[in-house]
Image (spheres, grey):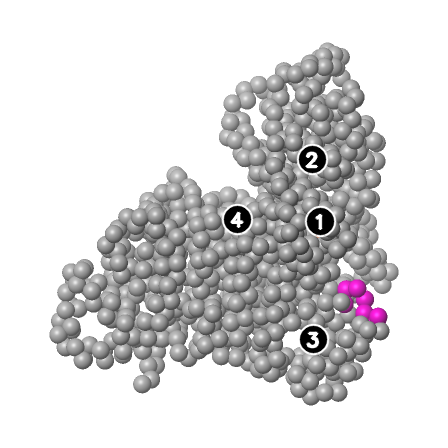
Amino acid sequence: MDTNARRRRIHTAVVSTDAGIYNHDLSLYSDFPKNPLGLPEFEELALERLQLLRIIENAALKGHKMYSDDWRNCIKEDLVKNNLKKYVRLMNGANGQGGADFQARRADHLSHYILRLAYCRSEDLRRWFLSREMEWFKIKFMAQTSAGVMQFLNINSLKYMPISNDIKDDIKSELMDSTPGLSHAVLSTIDIYKVPFTDVLPLIKSRRTYLKEGYAFIPMSDLVVCIQSKFRATLSESLNQINHRLSNVDDDRLNDLLCNLHNTYTGKEYIENPNKDAVDIGDLNDYSKKHFPLCMRHLHEVLRANHHLRHSGRLIYGLFLKSIGVLYEQFIEFWRQEFTKIMDNNKFDKDYLYNFNHQFGKVGKMVSYAPYSCIKIIMGNVGPGEAHGCPFKHWDVSYLKTKLNEYGGTQESIQEVINLVTNGHYQIACTKYFECAHGQPPVNSINHPNQYFEESMTLIKGRNKDK
Amino acid sequence: MSAEYIEEQLSYLLPIYYKRLFPSLPFYRWLSYGKSTNFSKREISFTLIGDIYLRFQSFDTHADFVNELCKRFPIKIDIGCVYQTKPRDKNMLTALIPVFKEVVFDIDMTDYDEIRTCCSGADVCNKCWKFMAIASKIIDATLREDFGFKHILWVFSGRRGIHAWVCDESARTLDDNVRSAIVEYMYVIKGGLGTSKKVNLVGNVHHSLKRALSIIDKYFIQSILKDQDILGTQERLDCFLNMVDEEVREIFRGNMRKLETSEQRWHSFEKTFADLQSKGQLSRGGRNMIEEMKLYYAYPRLDVNVSKALNHLLKAPFCVHPKTGKICIPFNVKNVDNFDLNNVPTLNQLMEQIDLYDKKTKEQDNMTMETDESTLNKFKIKDYKKTSLLGPVNIFMEFLRGLESKSEKRKMENADLNF
Ligand code: SF4
Ligand SMILES: [Zn+2]
């Protein structure tokens, strides 16, 4: 690293006007950085934060339940391993006032802003960045004591008023029914806050709060959801704005750095089929058995059996097919062949064709949609009569067992997969399944159905060459 | 008098329907929300005879709208969202930017096929209609009590489903994120072809589900156990038991199989449950088994995609269903138990009712030939009042009054729009 940068960093860190905004481990990053930053330090900070966010993402991919102690420890260990102790420092909730604390917060602040520049560029990048930043915020928040939280609320002028004890008494039983983990004993000792339901959507989605006439009644521990949603909204807006203005960055070096950050270090999006080999629809039955992950194989088989898929199934399977290299004409032909087994061509044209053209970006907004990643599939809803979803997540264990048997897994390997599933490690289970099917594990853990396909293809191609 | 419905008749009956019966003024007032640009920037799509689908239409005034209706007599009208500019002026270069749309819900009987036993597919009878009654009550209560919405219009979709339009201003401007959250709050039956147990309640039963269960309880014995006979055959019983935890399944099976009717079997299920629980033989996950079963067999099954996105279109009230000839009439949730599918007016019935009326007042025959707008409007009042569309229109008007009483301060731009 450039020594100049190091000196400059230390120099800027002690500027007293800056110290004021670095009093607390938690930050909403509302202040735009004012002091100039050298390119080397800029780059170093960017890579470090990227590592931080990747480490957070990987902890979940390794199968740790998010926000559990295991998960936190895994993140801490990885941070230490990667020389990012300063971020560990922000995870202990101490809000220390020493020099190293200020340094850590300054790095946190600046690097966050740098990544805004790199991650504003596409919908998927923005989504990824937003999710990781929310997680990082929550990691820090969860470590805070209530005094720490109060202090943070004050610093950021966030005003939440607890409801009176009388009101709390009135809605006691509703609160206990509707707030997981809220017992009689706990309820009597804590404050309850009344907030608009739109501030706590994650709690609404999972039905984890008492809701009355548009207001949610939440304990202090859930305030983090409100703050996160505010943070998310401002960050998301800011990313959109930066994106619009980004063409103004005329420094080539900077531009390279920002774009490369994305290319070099983030997961693939799989929008374009990278291996460029066209896949023939006549081969799909064969491919589905050999190279598709279970989720796609299931969709394929249900489609062949019922000659129909519901909306989400069509979308997920369609985008997958498109990205493995099925060409447009064949793509339409494939769906037509199946659907017209139960309806006439007219109906297909009228009710479905637009939909498939849309997937291919031929009509409507004309955008190329990215195929669904595992996370998106796993987090999605599957309703009655629908065939999409991640088998490891959405199926009954007994049904999964039957299917795996049917597909010819050994008892031992099936049990291994099932164990992973019952512990909630869906993608690891999928990775294991890959290993059982191919006799060797994929290069990376499975995080995308298209990655599964590609790894499977590469493997087979390699073997064919070896012969 | 039987009014057998024939699809071919559409082409000459529909123009009359739109001219004389379709409540276009209240319809216009509704979608204007007190401001004419709300209407003129709203996407209203038509499907014409021969399945010609015209999207991105919009109409500047009430008169324009009526003219087009009479000229094109669509077999279906869909309502989309209000955009920043008139959808009609859409071009290749500028994207339409959505501004607002009601939060909508679509419940279709086909989503109940795995549990209903009286009919399947497109068919529907008064027995399975009870699913819709339960669904509308639960959703209505949730929207009002939990989310605080007040202006909700319920509409029969013309064949086998129902729609809800949540029209509060606060609802209309919600973004997709909030819409999904609201839907997911009401999304209880989860899992597709690979899942047998689709309802899972952990810990205490949420307040909103307790309310839903109290609604379901009013119907459970008669509509679910007796009418649907959900436990009446071996196959149905197996299906039911598959949702029970493996460890105790056989105990339940043994007890339930001894009995004949669904009702007896259910009581045995309840009793066995109580026994096992008192002996401490149920796992923690089995604690809410009874509630889970009731929800599985009666809780609303939403088409979630319709509600999640701002720009999703939904069929308008007072359309004529082209297959059944039934009018998509608004209904009152409070009286949904009295809603009889066989009493939903059909296009033919309405026409007969008008004819009857016309015969009585001969001179009016000549008047309807007139094209003068004001004369027409005058007679429209009489027309619908002489038919069985009166009740549904009144329900619509009541909804409209509620909506407008709130926004009264913002004066109606068109003062003469009194229907
Ligand atoms: S882990 Fe991913 S690729 Fe594997 S089955 Fe699930 S969704 Fe598909
Ligand atoms: Zn029926």
Question: Helix, strand or loop at disc 4?
Answer: helix
Q: Earlier in the sequence, mark 3 or mark 4?
A: 4
Residue B240 marker: 3
Question: With respect to residue B157, does A70 lie above or below?
Answer: above
Task: Mark 4 and mark 2 in contact? Answer it, CB < 8 Å.
Answer: no
What whole-number distance in Å separates the C-alpha atoms at marks 1 and 3? 36 Å
Range of magenta residues? B280-286
Disc 3 chain ID: B
Residue A345 placed where, x, y %? Answer: 45, 64
Q: Nearer the viewer, mark 1 or mark 3?
A: 3
Q: Nearer the viewer, mark 3 or mark 2?
A: 2
Query: Cβ(mark 2) to ligand 1 < 8 Å?
Result: no
Question: With respect to residue A172, does A232 lie above or below?
Answer: above
Tell me the amino acid under the disc marked 3. Phe
Q: Nearer the viewer, mark 1 or mark 4?
A: 4
Question: Helix, strand or loop at disc 1?
Answer: helix
Disc 2 chain ID: A
Mark 1, other Cα within 10 Å: few <14 / some 14–19 / many ≥20: many
Question: With respect to residue A415, does B360 lie above or below?
Answer: below
Q: Are marks 4 and 2 on the same chain?
A: no
What whole-number distance in Å separates the C-alpha atoms at marks 3 and 4? 36 Å
Task: Mark 3 and mark 2 in contact? Answer it, CB < 8 Å.
Answer: no
Tell me the amino acid under the disc marked 2. Met
Question: With respect to residue A88, does A332 lie above or below?
Answer: below
Mark 1 = which residue? A452
Residue A236 placed where, x, y %? Answer: 57, 36
Mark 4, other Cα within 10 Å: few <14 / some 14–19 / many ≥20: some
Query: Cβ(mark 4) to ligand 1 < 8 Å?
Result: no
Residue B189 located left or right of residue B336: right
Disc 1 chain ID: A
Mark 4 = which residue? B176
Tell me the amino acid under the disc marked 1. Tyr
